[in-house]
Image (cartoon, grey):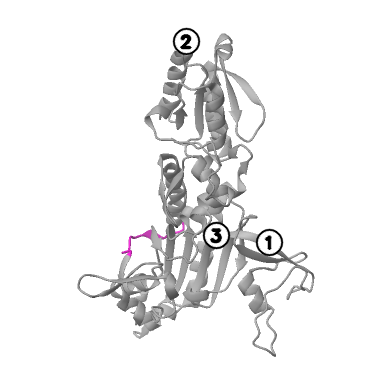
Amino acid sequence: MRWTRSHIPTLREVPTEAEVVSHQLMLRAALIRKLSAGTYSYLPLGQRSLLKVIQIIRQEMNRAGALEVLLPALQPAEVWKRSGRYATMGPEMIRFKDRHGKEMVLGPTHEEVITQLVSGEIRSYRDLPKTLYQIQVKFRDEPRPRFGVIRSCEFLMKDAYSFDRDEKGLEVSYQGMFDAYQRIFERVGLKAIPVEAETGVMGGEDSHEFMVLAQSGEDTVVCCTACSYAASKGRAARDCKSETTDEVRYPVEGDPCVKCGKPLKLLAAIEVGHIFKLGTKYSSTLSATFLNEDGKQKAFVMGCYGIGVTRILAAVIETHHDEAGIRWPLTIAPFPIVIVPINLGDSATRREADALYEKVTQAGLEALLDDREVSGGVKLKDADLIGFPIRILLSEKTLQQSSVELKLRSQASSTLVKSSEVVGSLKKLLDKEGGLAG
């Protein structure tokens, strides 16, 4: 892609509306633009990174044996009333009546819909287990949308649902998703800590949240300084609850760990994933059953597994940036390579830049050629702001040596590479870093 044929309107000033680094940089690096409170449009670079996150999630879900579906965002209120959650979801659920007076909702999640679907499609234990997933927009009328895409009213989620014949099967499905989540977060460049968590409005028997430590995080990880105990703030409050009183008291820094008695530590974090052992909460309520080996009707034993897809981008930026801008992991950078020719007014430089761009793209590598007729300083600042992992610089000086400057965004110094060896060097580098894209 050539810069002049894309749309990359970077911003020099920090937007006053942006409270956290990820929101600031997503606006400044031309990844998103605000439409209204809690809703954002994704510009070309933001969409490229988002699609790469989706590709990784899809690969790992398929690897774990999950099957992709697509469920309606527009849902009849009746199915929510049957489960009992229509009354408990609160004002975050967007509710309205259609032109026929039928009560409808915009789906904040899809447990009811998937349960109703499966109850009409899977009738025998021979068809189990099954795990179905989708990647789709969710809607929640947040009381206070903030921090850009970290807490928004419309967001992209990957939600999966497992259906098993018994609790033993659920344990296997749950562990499979747990392992898949760890692979996903590692591949997108996040250090996500799994912690025990409350089930909340989702219900069920047990759950784990995947937390990314970040100063801007609205969530809290409660962990022990000595043992392996780690929990969400709500779960830690339940764990610490006295047997003699119903009072709920959230732990504070230095409280004794319930497992070993050593001091607790509280850390700010961003929740990027949450998985639940639902059991028969929805299947029993919605009469979703199958015939077991004895020919008897039995409720499906379910699990559900969510990842905040759009939130991943913000979490990555919160944990991968410096004073100059974003530092994308190779796997989800909008382009892993940017080619920066200095002084395109020089015909030799322009010819060499075009030739290098053609060689790189013909080799199957993703690259953006900055062919704007602006100063070298502007190009270099934009390259660092957007955070391309690899920068190739061409100038009259490098041409005199039949070379280019190759620099990693994560390093301060650059390396002089012969022009004839650039493609080979890039392939080795991308393959080593796990970001080879073809």
In this view, the residue farthest toward the left is: 100
Which residue occupies 72% across, 71% down? 252
Residue 28 seen in render: yes
Quick check: 344 above or below 437? above
User: For numbered disc 1, what is the local secondary structure?
Assistant: strand
Which residue occupies 52% across, 21% down? 375
In this rendering, which labeled residue sits more in front, label 2 or label 3?
Answer: 2
Relative depth, front residue between 293 and 124:
124
Left or right: 204 with respect to 254?
left
On residue 267, the disc is: 1
Q: Earlier in the sequence, mark 3 or mark 1?
A: 3
Q: Position of residue 335 (x, y in %)?
A: 48, 35
On residue 179, the disc is: 3
The amino acid at mark 2 is: Ala
Give the quarter of the image for residue 141: bottom left
Query: Where is the N terminus found, in terms of image quarters?
Result: top left
Tell me whether circle 1 and circle 2 mark residues in contact (CB < 8 Å): no
Q: CA distance from mark 2 to mark 3?
A: 52 Å
On residue 348, the disc is: 2
